[in-house]
Image (cartoon, helix red, strand yellow):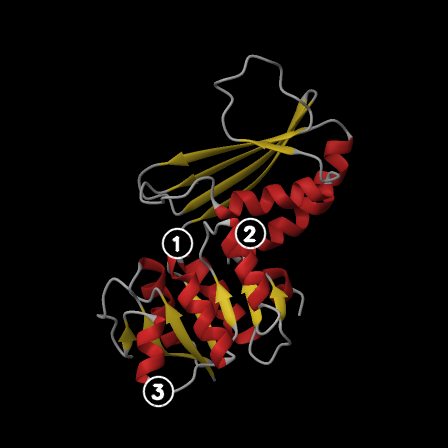
Amino acid sequence: MTNILLSGCNGKMGRMVTDLAAKDENTAVIAGVDAFGTSAAGYPVYPSFEALAEAGGEKPDVIVDFSNASALEGLLAYAVKEGVPCVLCTTGYSEAQLAAIKEASAKIPVLRSGNMSIGINLLDDLLKEAAAKLTAAGFDVEIVEKHHNQKVDAPSGTALLLADTICAAAGGDYDYVYDRTTRREKRPKKEIGISAVRGGTIVGDHDVIFAGEDEVITFSHRAYSRAVFGKGALEAAKFLPGREPGMYDMHSVLNR
């Protein structure tokens, strides 16, 4: 049994993970941390990691975080002090926060991914081969991501994850372009255009477009429910305890 401390437990994804964990005989959420309320059913919820530490209680096997980038400092401080592995599902971290995550990974196992979906991470693997061959053949690369109107960051962490994979496979010297309205010039070859759509209740759509001369190849992923992210997070939570300190991602889970 993997005992989980769920950060952001009262958010949409937190509630989803709570429901999925209750149906999984190998996981249990034993406590939660949420700055915006303490109404989650079935386990104690604390307003901060500081409050959790003061209260004591059972030590979790792993922390699963679906909260907000602003919660990172308290989360890492608790995790490092208690020696608890972390599955970080939140996006929108600053460069300084990414550095703090890397520093923490020297002491505890940390799994971070721009998208917890198994499908997206398999797509990411496929893009490594496709990007190397298609960019060498002169194909341009564009990424279009679509999300609901409540998402506050753009582009999505998933779009950046896919762009980073493509850039690395294509030689690592591509620029990311988010807006072309201020320039009047032809499209340079060494760029990846990333466009963000926000509207309605779109859970998450990602299209990676390779446009060549007289042909277009598109890789697409559609998420119809947030459950795909929750299921991936639980697989990561079961994978991480007992691992050596270091940085992990969903490819580590899929290739175990």
Which quarter of the picture shows residue 5?
bottom left
Tell me the CA gap for discs 3 and 1.
Answer: 33 Å
Tell me the CA gap for discs 3 and 2.
Answer: 36 Å
Q: Residue at label 3?
A: 57
* Circle 1 SS class: loop
- Callout 3 environment at 10 Å: few (<14), some (14 to 19), or many (20+)? few
Q: Tag 2: residue type?
A: Ile
User: What x and y, as percent, mark residue 120?
Assistant: 55, 51
169 sits left or right of 41 in the view? right
* Circle 3 SS class: loop
Q: Residue at label 1?
A: 225
Residue 17 visible in image: yes
- Residue drawn 51% across and 74% down? 80
* Circle 2 SS class: helix
Q: Tag 1: residue type?
A: Ser
Q: Is residue 238 above or below residue 251?
A: below
